[in-house]
Image (cartoon, grey):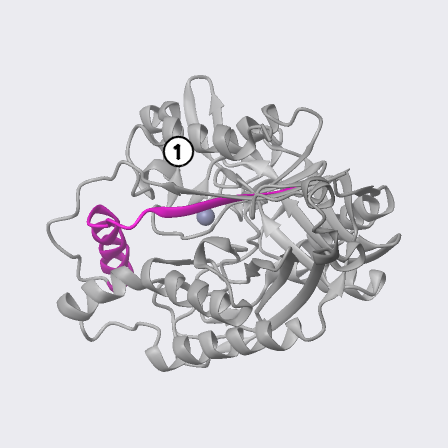
Amino acid sequence: MYRHLSPPISRRSALATGLAAFFHTEDTFRIAPFQCDATPDKGEPNIWVQPVTTVMDPLFVKGVVIESLSRRYVLAALDWCGIGGAADLLLRTALARGAGTDIKRIALQSVHQHAAPYIEGDAYKILAKVRPNDLRMSDAYLNRLAASLEAAVRQALSKAQPFDQVGTGEARVERVASARRILKNGQLLTRFSTSGKSPELAAEPEGAIDPTLRTVTFAAAGKPLVRLHYYATHPQTFCCDGRVSADFVGSARAAMEAHDGIPQLYFTGCGGDVTVGKYNKGEDAERAALSDHLLAAMKASAATTRLHTIEHFEWRYRDLVLPTRAAPDSYPDEPQLAYRAAITAAFAARTRPLPTSALHLGPAVIVHLPGEPLLEFQRHAQSLSRGRLIAVAGYGDISPGYLCPDEVLRQGGYEPSASNAAAGTETRVKSILNELLAPSTR
Ligand SMILES: [Zn+2]
């Protein structure tokens, strides 16, 4: 017997009231995987304001449309460093249009590679006034991406397949993630993504990470159809030039698709203060090793996946409003710094709440958060698991930047310096998590 919260009618009550004919058990749930190219054109901005020069490998939006009782929900992972404000709204709207559903049933999460664009549409509106000559992603490119995303979703729907099971799997990832913040002898050290160059920082222990990769599989009569993987680390081996790449997570994902023969989606969890710095100097061989280690965990997680019938399906959406920092009163001459100042100004002026959501699928719950949440928020979500598999995707609307617990804001360091959200963020994000993860009362 399953329960469904929206629309508020269950199969049990349908049977009791003679409405069973409305429900076809075999097609109550349907899923449609889709994919759309999201590689920026040459000359468009890659991360920050660096123009694209070379494409090492293409970027994608990879997603699924899930249908339950004629309502559709979209979960999508975008191979960009971040997308926020008006640009995030543009792509969410395209996904909602393609799926013929409400925008509050869309989760669009960036994977956060740093050889990829970081586009904040509200900051662009400010820059257009104060620094009109700086490089911004063109409306022509963004509108073309939105149109092809909408078309990809619409096309996928014609091939939607029924599913009746959800799979839960997990595996430990070896030698990938390590803490960025290291407190040593009362001193805060910062281990950035290429800190392997420093023998001292590489020698420090992995520190506070969540070593578990979690996998949610959609299946029909025992046959897996698509897998969604969740792991918390910055997926960054190099950064900040004109080279475009989905980095080591993209190559692991592609290798897993070849191995498993079905679509694979990869989402980055609360990896705000987690990097690959212990294991990475930025060399090709290290990138390949990180990809292999992640792939090994994807395979192990798939191999140990247990399938369950879906006794409870529910989508929860919550608006999140965060305390903001003061807007800067001027813009530096350097274009990247000016862009970052505009992002802070845009967030300070923002009135539209940030979207958060959770999909409850029997023993699996998938949570979607905005910004760059620090690991503490994933730990909080896991503390509410009650035996369920909790998969967390961060990096929805990127506008707030890092989401820092209050203690981290007090300590200072890198993440607070790149956050547009102020003290009090912790309470608000944790209370949203409490709501999103509360067991259903119906
Ligand atoms: Zn980051």
Residue 322 screen position, x and y as percent: 31, 38
Q: Is residue 28 above or below residue 135?
A: above
The answer to whether residue 233 is left or right of residue 228 is: left
Q: Is residue 356 magenta?
A: yes
Give the residue at x 53% y 27%.
380
Extreme residue in the left direction: 329
Name of the residue lying farthest toward the top: 185
Image quadrant holding the N terminus, namely top right
Residue 395 in the image: above or below residue 263: above
Query: Which span is picked out in magenta?
Result: 335-361
Give left or right: position of 412 versus 57.
Answer: left
Q: Is residue 83 left or right of residue 8?
A: left
Q: List the residue tagged with mark 1.
A: 404
**Residue 16: percent from left, percent from top:** 72, 40
Residue 224, quarter of the rendered image = bottom right
**As rendered, which of 258 and 383 lies closer to the eye?**
383
Q: Which residue is more in the foreground, 51 or 28?
A: 28
Q: Label 1 sits on what residue type?
A: Cys
The spot of residue 165 in percent (x, y) is: 79, 48
Q: Nearer the viewer, residue 46 or 257?
A: 257
Q: Residues within 10 Å of mark 1 (few under 14, many from 20)?
A: many
Quarter of the picture containing the C terminus is top right
To which quarter of the image does residue 232 belong?
top right
Residue drawn at point x = 79 percent, y = 51 percent: 164
